[in-house]
Image: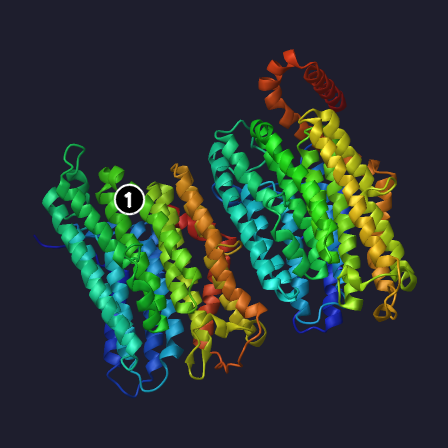
Amino acid sequence: MRGIARGRGLGATAVKAIAFGIGLITFVISLGLYTEFNADLATFQLGGTPIEWIPGGVSYHIGVDGISLWLVLLTTFLTSVCILAAWNSVEKGLSGFMMSLLALETGMLGVFCSLDLFLFFVFWESMLIPMYFLIGVWGGERRIYATVKFVLYTMAGSALMLVGILALYFQNGNSFDLTTLSGPFEHSDLLFLAFFIAFAIKVPLFPFHTWLPDAHVEAPTVGSVILAGVLLKMGTYGIIRFCLPLFPDAAEKFTPLIVTLAVIGIIYGALVAMVQPDLKKLVAYSSVSHLGFVVLGLFSKNPVGIQGSMLQMINHGLSTGALFLLVGMIYERRHSRMIVDFGGLSKRMPIFATIFMIVTLSSIGLPGLNGFVGEYMILAGSFVGQAFSKVYVVFATAGVILAAIYMLWMFQRVMFGTLDKTNENLPDLNAREIVVLLPILLFIVWIGVYPKPFLSKMEKSVAVVVTKVQTAPAMGQLEKQKLRDPKLALQGTLRTQHEKREKEAKQ
Amino acid sequence: MPIEINWQLLMPELVIALTLIIVLVFDLFDAISKTVLGWMTIVGAGIALWVSIQMHQAGTVGIQFNEMFKVDSFSLFFNIIFLVSTILVVLISMSYLDRGDRKQGPYYLLILLATLGMMLMAAGNELIVVFLGLELMSLSLYVLAGYFRESPASSEAGMKYLLLGAFASAFFLYGIALIYGGAGTTSIPAIAEAITAENKSPLLLAGMFLLVVGFGFKVAIVPFHQWAPDVYEGAPTTIAAFISAGPKAAGFAAFLRIFMEALPSLQVEWSGVLILLAMLTMTVGNVIAIAQTNIKRMLAYSSIAHAGYVLIGLAAANDDGISSAMLYLLIYCVMNIGAFGAVILAKTADGESLMISDYAGLGTRKPLLAIFMSVMLLSLAGFPPTAGFVGKFYIFKAAVGAGHIWLVIIGAINTAISAFYYLRVVVTMYMREPEEELEFSPYASTLVIGLILAVVGVLLIGILPSLMLTPAQNSVF
């Protein structure tokens, strides 16, 4: 699972080959996780027995469930793609670049697999350093500002999370083991916030998003892909793994606030993306908007909504990753990312234009492609879930329309119209670039047409989260509200039905 | 009353004293290369370290000299900290001193004397013995800070340190006197017995606060920290490394011993003060460090901030707090000496390059140096998987366990603040192009050995914390 390449003193090609080999091997091993994973069980699997690391409650305890499985696969997949994509674009310090990339992969996989809070935090923090170097050394002009901002934002958040983890440790019988953690906890509101703010910064949820456009614009292409594709998911993963199941009361309490922020993020991100003159910044702001959807779905606390969010996390990793790759490819040719510098590219670069079109449509949620399934499930789940007012869903749906506007408008300005003279000699994609993009396209279509293999693996694990998050308020507040609100009563029965089904499944 | 001396208990101290004499004698012969003296110091300190480790593992406990001198796991653990610091400092000193016709003998002699003083402080079971150790250590350090006589900055540093240090000693002594007035004894266990709930005389409280002031000066706690940046900047860099490491640990050793063992019944009074001082020290140290352009001054403020983290452990005042403070001091000594060592390694033809901006482009031009420096700075900033993270983690854990959530939140926020200025150096090394090409001197082998030891130590404790955590937990008195 963990590969750290050291390629000093070797030729450039050897370094790239070793890095790609390690990335690919990791991906193949992680595919084994998919086949070995038993989707009928909601437990953590395939982690082996925990090994005691530090006496006093810290162990090397790893494992995956239906939620982390997908993020692990996404990580290994995108890392391999990224190594291939960065083949010719790194001019200095190639071995350092590849080392950072693989160290980053180690950190990200660690975050998704850790079942020990200490271990989780160690990986969470250690992944900062390689990303810091990726942006800071190989980034654009304002890279230093961007990278320092990125690290400081994350560290500020994780400082609070560390306090939260320590407080949980003492309430968990002096153990950091995640699987033995069960509420209710004292000061759960504060603990929830301690975790949530760390994750919200990472997601990034409005108003913590300001580091994201800077980091994206300055990062090298591959850095942006990893950042958008996987790093942001660490935030949403944290929410679904810690915030929702551990502190259901607090999650219930803060739902209106968080959902408001998510919807603001959806619309704000879309509006800001619309006016961006820079392609990369446009994609960056579209991330803010898309991740708003994911958070919305998570807090719907409804199986459909959360599964939609999970799927949308993968979708966003694929679509936005592909968009960043495409922007990077055009930047390598033209050394500009300004929309005004382009126009009529479809005549010169038909393959590029076609792929760009598919990815754009996937990003705006065209039926038949992956984005649609995720967004539809999120919106449907939020609508029937009753966790928050339907008004939020209405506004969020407006975000879908806005996404179509800014993406298609961008596409039109870049691809159609008159071809500028300076762009007349731009070569179309070469074989390597097509190889980089094709697997992503494959998944984009696959998830869009037949998402069942993806959903079926996560169903049980999501159901566990849903049960946990619905139990606490159902016991307290919901009972009282039922008398007044017939719809809530209905939801209660839905839940009992769901539990019944689960029991049957177990038998 | 005849005093029976158990020589075995005194082995580490005796080895150091013996080395001291050998160095003193061999310094008389001009024919002997002066680096040999450095190696003698290292061997002596190494033997003492080995003996201390053996005694620590065997769980040796004993009281000597009319109950004035107490050897236990606590003092032995601190011996390990002091001796590790001394060895590292001597390793980074050898090439640093080796220029011109500078006399080297007294330098090693004074370092050994200071080490002996520290060991006395950690083992003192009697306020007067602690004071003796403190003075032995401080007087040696005053001379060392002004060791480069030809440099006005060094002389100024020595003078400043002497004056402020003398003040601090006076406060400390006055505190002892008042405690003697209140408790009728200066023996640490006897003081604990003499103080009861109903017998909390104002004399005792005044004495206790004077002790806090005295220690505050010695370990550079805000608001008693003003001397530190000036002294660190002016003193020879190796001595700045030394002052920031061992003596600070020694100060905390005596601090722990006196407050936890002699004054536990006054905990209500002192814990609030310590919490306040910890918050102030961390915040002021870190915030001012951001503004520094000279790396030695930056490290000076950073070392002030680190004293604040240790204070969190003291404020927690439980077994976890004590052991985590001890672990932190050990880790801090290694990484701080390592950071100063990296500064020495960045030597140019016309002296040291101390401005942070001089480090631009080191990442590609001097990769080894840049890696050393980065590991040390990342550890100081508390990133996993370095020892600095483990140290902070256990300090915070102890404080959360003691219920000081707010203190931990402030500490955690400070960690984020500190990342800013530590990372700025890393940024300069790897991400900025140099404005002028500085000619860096070739590496000295002893210095590189010292740095490799520090890097290995920092990473080893970072990955396998139980190596040092368990001994620290077993060393709580």
Residue bearing mark 1: B273
Q: Residue furthest left?
A: B1
Of residues B162 and B69, which is closer to you in this image?
B162
Query: Which structural element holds mark 1?
Result: helix
Q: Is residue A24 visible to us here? A: no
Q: Residue at x 48, y 54 (%)?
A: B382
Q: Splitting the image into 4 quarters, where does residue B146 fall?
A: bottom left
Check the residue under mark 1 and report the chain it is in.
B
Q: Residue at x 41, y 40 (%)?
A: B406
The image shows residue B366, relative to residue A195, as above or below, that is below
Q: Position of residue B84 (x, y in %)?
A: 37, 63
In this picture, residue A403 sits left or right of residue B132: right
Q: Splitting the image into 4 quarters, where does residue A13 fall?
A: bottom right
The image shows residue A471, relative to residue B390, as above or below, that is above
Q: Is residue B233 visible to us here? A: yes
In this picture, residue B181 sits left or right of residue B92: left
Of residues A439 and B152, which is closer to you in this image?
B152
